[in-house]
Image (cartoon, grey):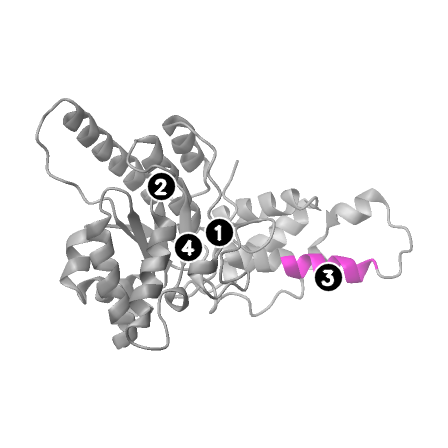
Amino acid sequence: DVFLPEVEGPLGPVNASRRGISDPAAAPAEEPQPERTLEELLNELDALTGLARVKDEIHRQTELLRIERLRAEAGLSAPTLTRHLVFVGNPGTGKTTVGRLVAGIYRALGLLDKGHLVEVDRSELVAGYLGQTAEKTTAVVQRALGGVLFIDEAYALAEDQYGREAVDTLVKDMEDHRDDLVVIVAGYPGPMARFVSTNPGLESRFARTITFDDYSADELRRIFESMTRSADFEPQPETLERFDRLAADQPRGEGFGNGRWARNVLDSAIARHAWRLRDVERPTLDQLRTLVPEDLEDVVDIGTDSEATA
């Protein structure tokens, strides 16, 4: 099994904002997550493509919290450890996927009741007028109780007084619900460091930052190959070689789409595949499934994903 990046549609989640739900308080209740053991969740984490540093950090955090719980059960004193996390990295590196696993891991450890994940961004926390933002933020927190509140591009909350009101409210709610709420904030490394430093309450609550590195060319190939087969396509070996060349040519600056870039390559290839068969009235099964190198020839200018998140 390999990692399929979080994307819209059948290969990934669609959060409330993407479904057109503008009021977080009016969003559907989160579905209970299936009960899974800690071992199952950690095995799923380890099966993800790449992310070696992330896996190591999550395993360490898991053991730290497990031992803290066992010490408490044994009647030993122990410092209260922060469970909140900062995820930093480019888009498409699996931050939301890992966030969901963290929610399940925390529930398996007995730290959360539900283990669900509520994913939001600035637009779902900030209102148009001062005073309304606090109510909107608290409504989102209420949805996340018992699970993880995942705030994407959280640094956008430091832009103005409305965002700062959301941050102040969030810090208070994190204290009020410290036993049944975990918050993960995510975004680019530089802006996230500045965001956390803007509020003393944030700095004290987000003591652990986990870095999501860009995927290597080989890891991108494995992601692309898994995506194609999940979509009932079969890439020829030469097609994968063509993908390798495309991946090697991609600039790896801030904003590189990583797994989302691979998804864009596949979307473009599928469109070209359909056009290639336009004059074939009844294609064979092999024709319907096979991606040839030419299907990747028109893939240009998709190396960055300026609208991508997490």
Residue under label 3, please give it.
272
Q: Position of residue 216 (x, y in %)?
A: 44, 50
To which quarter of the image does residue 255 belong?
Answer: bottom left
In the displayed structure, does residue 224 sit left or right of residue 236?
A: left
Q: Which mark is residue 119?
A: 4
Instruction: Name the amino acid, label 3.
Output: Arg
Please report whichever mark, 1 or 2, sits nearer to the chain's N-terminal start.
2
Residue bearing mark 1: 217
* Helix, strand or loop at mark 2: helix
Say whether disc 2 or disc 4 marks the residue closer to the N-terminus.
2
**Seen in the image, is 214 located left or right of residue 218?**
left
Q: Secondary structure at mark 4?
A: strand
Whether pointer 2 and pointer 4 mark residues with C-beta atoms closer than 8 Å, the reply is no
Sequence order check, earlier mark of 1 and 3: 1
Residue 270 in sight: yes
Residue beneath disc 2: 102
Look at 41% across and 47% down and name the residue there.
117
Please state the horizontal and vertical placement of residue 122, each as a whole percent of the image: 37, 67
Tag nearer the camera, 3 or 2: 2
Depth order, front residue of 201/43: 201
**N-terminal-most mark, 3 or 4:** 4
